Every structure is written in C-alpha cells, then in structure tokens.
Image (spheres, grey):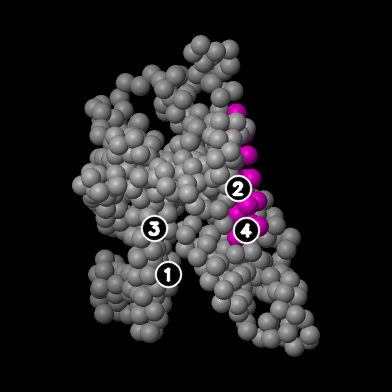
Amino acid sequence: MNYHWNWGIFLEQVKGGDETYLHWLISGLGWTVAVALSAWVIALVLGSIVGTLRTVPNRWLSGLATAHVELFRNIPLLVQLLLWFFVVPELLPRDLSLWVKQEMPAKEFFTAVICLGLFTSARVAEQVRAGIQSLSRGQKMAGLAIGFTLPQTYRHVLLPMAFRIVIPPLTSEFMNIIKNSSVAFAIGVLELTFQARQMQEDSEQGIETYLAVTLLYFIVAFSANRVMALIERRSRVPGYIAAAK
Amino acid sequence: MSFFAQFDFSVIAPSLPFLWEGLKFTAKLTLIAMAGGIFLGTLLALARLSSIAPLAMAATWYVNLMRSIPLLMVILWFFLIIPLLTGKPMGAETSAIITFTAFEAAYFSEIMRAGIQSVPRGQVFAGQAIGMTYWQTMSYVVLPQAFRNMLPVLLTQTIILFQDTSLVYAIGAKDLLKAAEIAGKNYGRPIEMYVFVALVYFLICFALSRLVKHFQARTAIIR
C-alpha cells in the first residue's frame, strides 16, 4: 500500500479557487445540518399528526393516515428524491412548473427538505402510533369518563404519555435523518457527502477526506443523540421504569 | 389532469428486458447481503455477548461505528479503500456486495443480539448440563429459538436493505434504479422511467411487508 498521507491537505487551497478544503467541508456541514433540522421539523409535526390519526376510530381518517405511511415507507429514499426533483415539477400547472424549474431559489435544498421530511414522517408516525397503542385502554376510557371529548383526551391524557414513551425510538430517527441527508448529494445539494466526493476528486487525498467527513457526521449525530437524551431526562414521569435510572 | 397527456408510458415495454437485468442485480445484492449479513451478524452478536473482553469490545466498536456512519459514506469508503489495500481497481458490483454485507452485518447483529437475549437463561444451563459444548449449545439450543423469535424483524431489516441497495447509484453499479436512469436517457423519457421504477419498488416492498405481518401473526400463535 503506497498511499501518500498528507494531513495538511485541509489547509491547502482548492484547485482554481482561493478557499481551502476546510472551507468546503465546513460549508458542507452547514448544509447537512440545515437539511436535517428543517426536515426533522416537518417529520415531527406531520408524523405526530399522521401517527395520531392512525389510532382514531374514524375509518376514513385512519385509512388516509395508513396510506400516507405505506406510500412513504415502501419506496427507497433516493427514488423518492428523484421523483420530487424530476417528476413532481412536471405535474404542476404550467406557470408554476416553469417557475419551479427555472426561477425557484435554492430549489435543491427545498426539494431535499420536503422529501426527507415526508419520508421520515412515515417512520415517526409509526413510532407515535406504537406509543399511543402501548398505553392501557383504561387511560382513554378514564379521559372520556371524566367528560373530555376525544380530541381533549388525546391532548391531555394520551399524547403526553405516548410522546415520552417514544423518545428513545425518536432519537434513532433523529440520527437517521442526519445520516439520510447524505442522499441529497444526488440532486446537487452541496452538503457533506457532495463536498467529500468533490474534495476527493480535487485533492486525490481520499482517505483523509473521508476520515474527516466521517468524523463530522459522527459528531453531528452524537450531538443529536445528547440533545434527545437531555429531553428524555427533563420530561421523565416519576413512577415509571424509565425514571428509576 | 391534462398534464398526464404529455407522458408517454409506451417506452416502458421495450426497456423491460434491460430493467429486468437491473432488478436481477438488485435482488442478487439483497440476497447475498442478507445471507452474509445474518451469518456475520450472528457471529458479531455472539462476540458481543462473549465473556472474552477484547472480543466483545472489538465487536461493539465495529457495530457502533457502522451504525453511526451514513450508508452512502460506507459505500464510498469501501469503493476507495479496498483498491488501495489490494492494489488493483475493483468493479462497482463486487464492491457493492462486500460493502452491503459488511454494513448489514452490524444491523443484523443487533437484531440477533436481541434474539439471543430473548432466550431464557435456563436453556443455556440445560444445554451445558447435558454436556454440550459452547458451540453445540448455541447452534442446537439458543440460535434456532433466537432466529424464530426474530424472523419478522430480520425480514423487516431485509426490506430496508432492499430499498437501500438503490444507493449503489453513487458508485455506478447497475441496479434497478441505474438501469431505469440509463433507459430513461436512451429513450429521452426519464420521467416515465422514474415513475415506473418507483411503482416496482413500492409493489415489491408492500408485498414483502404483508409477508412480515403474516409471519408475525403466525409466531404470535405459536407462543
């Protein structure tokens, strides 16, 4: 193995530019965090609504929610991304379609955020549903018995417990969304994976490049993990197994 | 919607043989990575649960490392590193098979670990009591039960694996998605191809997830 190590590469200037490779990686990191966090907001809000709707007695609503989950869970993320980027603009009315294709600012970014958000919302919905269904039936009955309407029972009795129960699986989903944001390179979002490939081709120092980028992903995912662990500790309910630790 | 009028789905039929080749590679990659991943994953799970500290630590590190890196990065890593180590370039297809087997082993090992831990301790003692060695206890007593308990989860992970194989796109291996992209370019109809390929993925994954539900119901009755 005759590989020429060069750890100084990060401070060297890129070919034909006045930035260093470090600049590329930092801006890539910024886009990765921006895509992942924006998509996470969509995934949490939409996933909570859809997951809750899957448990309601109304067959139309729960059917619609199930369809949402099945649709976004059974198509690979990369294929969904290409559909959003190439196919969806064609389905829009003519003027809007032209605007999206030619003038929409940060088109790649918004496409990636919407796609990743919807993809993850299906997974969040499944966790939220499992959380609600893990509660004993008595909780819902108690809520209705003291005169709450069904929405009030969900708001004040079921959801506060269900959300606490599903924090650990949601932590995994949060870390997944950061890892999955790497797929956005395929439509040209200048995130970490895109920058890694660009830097490897430009500098020919593949190992250093990928080591650095892997470390950056690791740091971001680990920070997400810590934030969720903090929320888990703060929202603990006394008297449950999770609180004993 | 009048916009569908612009679509021309007649390009699908002539490109079917080409797409079939892509689907065959996707299936091959999925099956090899599943078999290899479950085999290596079981070994990793046994290592993690073993009383030999360095072995347990090494396995834990491997699993945690693989699980904290995006799959796409792992694909690029292997595609770059293996040729550096062996000194000769490697085809995207071979690289993809090695990568997916090594990557999935980490995920399957977590499933198998949970499976092994779901077997009551008494089963291990019983095996030892009738004079079985470690490997005999594992292969005749513990692992068969662990596999059966975890069958639905192993299948669910395989569905995820099947979807994830589309990421070999990044190194240019000709799977179903890449085949669709090439066919789309050749006929000048990429849109129709993407829609068609999404439908194929959806139908396969949907059918497989029904199968998992069926297995779940069956194992639930046995208990």
Mark 1 vs mark 3, CA separation in Å: 34 Å
Whichever of labels 1 and 3 marks the residue nearer the N terminus, that label is: 1
- Image coords of residue B146 (percent x, y): 35, 71
Mark 3–mark 4 contact, CB under 8 Å? no
Residue holding disc 4: A46
| Chain letter for the residue marked with disc 2 in the picture | A
Label 4: element kind: helix
Residue B196 lies left or right of residue A73; in this view the side is left
Mark 4–mark 2 contact, CB under 8 Å? no
Q: Are marks 1 and 3 on the same chain?
A: yes
Q: Amino acid at mark 1?
A: Gln
Where is residue A44, by image quadrant? bottom right
* Mark 2 vs mark 3: in front: 3
Q: Amino acid at mark 4?
A: Leu
Label 2: element kind: helix
Residue holding disc 3: B202
Residues rendered magenta in the picture: A26-47
| Chain letter for the residue marked with disc 3 in the picture | B
Q: Amino acid at mark 3?
A: Phe
* Mark 1 vs mark 4: in front: 4
Mark 3 vs mark 4, CA separation in Å: 21 Å
- Image coords of residue B71 (percent x, y): 43, 44
Q: Residues within 10 Å of mark 1 (few under 14, many from 20)?
A: few
Q: Which mark is residue B117?
A: 1
Where is residue A170, by image quadrant? bottom right
Can residue B105 be found in the magenta stretch?
no
Instruction: Out of A139 and A73, give the one closest to the viewer.
Output: A73
Residue holding disc 2: A39
Where is residue B116, by image quadrant? bottom left
